[in-house]
Image (cartoon, rainbow, N blue to C red):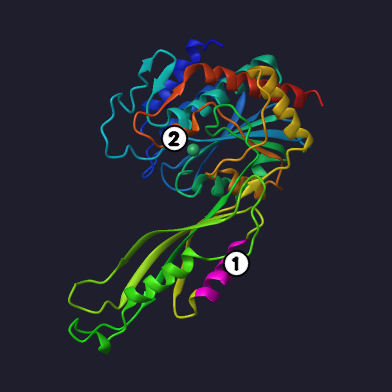
Amino acid sequence: MTSSPQDLFLLRHLISFDTINPPGNEEECASFIGEILVDHGYEVKSLEFAPKRTSLVAISKARESGKSAICFCGHMDTVPLGNAPWQHGPFSGEIVGDKIYGRGASDMKSGLVAMIITAVRLAEMGLNERVLMLFTAGEETFCQGARYVAERHQLLGHIGGLIVCEPTSNRPVIGHKGAIHYKITFRGKTAHASMPHMGINAIYKASDAIQKLRNLDLGVSGHPLLGPPTINVGTMSGGQNINSVPDLATIGVDIRTLPDQTEEKIRTALQDLLGTDVDIELLGQARGIFTEPGDPWVKEVFRAVEDVTGARPEPSTVPYFTDASMLSPALGSPPTVILGPGEPELAHKTDEYCYIHKIEEAAQIYLRILESWCLK
Ligand SMILES: [Zn+2]
């Protein structure tokens, strides 16, 4: 499959916008995308969850109310560059053979390009009345933009299916775990380090808690495709000086959840385990997502992928969460597939790239999905 000059122009342009989050600053990238879609007959709404943190919703002017649409979703922000030097400029969009380099090439500006190309072609074919394109800000920080859009979901109308164009190398993915982040604080009593029995050591309390958390059983058997929920203590800090008994320690805990696990249940399990004299603060959460492989629309998506790529996809899931965590519950849990042209293993890496031919492949898959949806 060959790429068009338009794919390359768009992707190089999107990579040139520094949308590293924080601070994100997606506004300029959003207005570039918005102008293209307005030129092709879409009504574009900007939704800012904070200054310069713009998400875009593009809806065809021909959208028929009452008919459900397919919503495509992608995020404009990227993660930081990391400490290692890049061989290819992270905002250059340098092309080497079938690869295009840059921060966000795979995660997920190539997905945005496939969305834009699909929107433009549908408009040219007069087939765009049942599609909605959503470009979000702030995904990498617990889906802030998608959450803001989800709170205003009436704008989107009825959605019959959701495609999140995150990097899957054009393999359809039907679910992912959710995530919950907690900061847990332990308090003690300070004393001189030469008389530790006079104090209460908050670091020891944290240490005991970490060992318990390590073996925490959340009482859920594993999901056949998603596996079991997991827990990781990712940060710890405590104490101000070495010659004092510390009276404060904190840890950061990341729990990866299955779709039916609620934050309330998990918090209760933690509180039962650690007792009531610890403070458990919720820092962020994203729901897990899963659509049954037997869902009729999921089957259509699989068929479209097979028609274009020639490979029959197997139902699978990914470990990372997506904007679907916020959007899917707000939209009434439509069938949801994660499907995009980037390479999942290159996301967040130094010298990130994507394969150019996969952008066109993704656009063709999206078009097929929409053609069969519009024929209903
Ligand atoms: Zn992403």
Residue 228 x, y percent position in the rendering: 60, 54
Going from N to C along the chain, the mark reached first, 2 or 1, is: 1
Residue 192 x, y percent position in the rendering: 19, 83
Q: In this view, does 188 lie to the left or right of 343?
A: left
**Quadrant holding the C terminus:** top right
Is residue 91 within the magenta segment?
no
Q: Residue at x 79, y 34 (%)?
A: 296
Q: What residue type is labelled 1?
A: Glu
The magenta stretch spans which residues?
Answer: 262-273
Between 216 and 89, which is closer to the camera in this rendering?
216
Q: Is residue 376 left or right of residue 322?
A: right
Between 310 and 161, which is closer to the camera in this rendering?
310
Q: What residue type is labelled 2?
A: Ala
Query: Is residue 30 in view?
Result: no
Residue topped by disc 2: 347
Residue 165 x, y percent position in the rendering: 57, 32
**Quadrant holding the N terminus:** top right
Q: In this view, does 30 lie to the left or right of 373?
A: left
Residue at disc 2, CB closer than 8 Å to ligand 1: yes
- Closer to the camera: disc 2 or disc 1? 2
Residue topped by disc 1: 264
Between 230 and 37, which is closer to the camera in this rendering?
230
Is residue 266 within the magenta segment?
yes
Q: Residue 108 carries which label?
A: none
Q: Residue at x 80, y 23 (%)?
A: 375
Residue 216 x, y percent position in the rendering: 53, 66
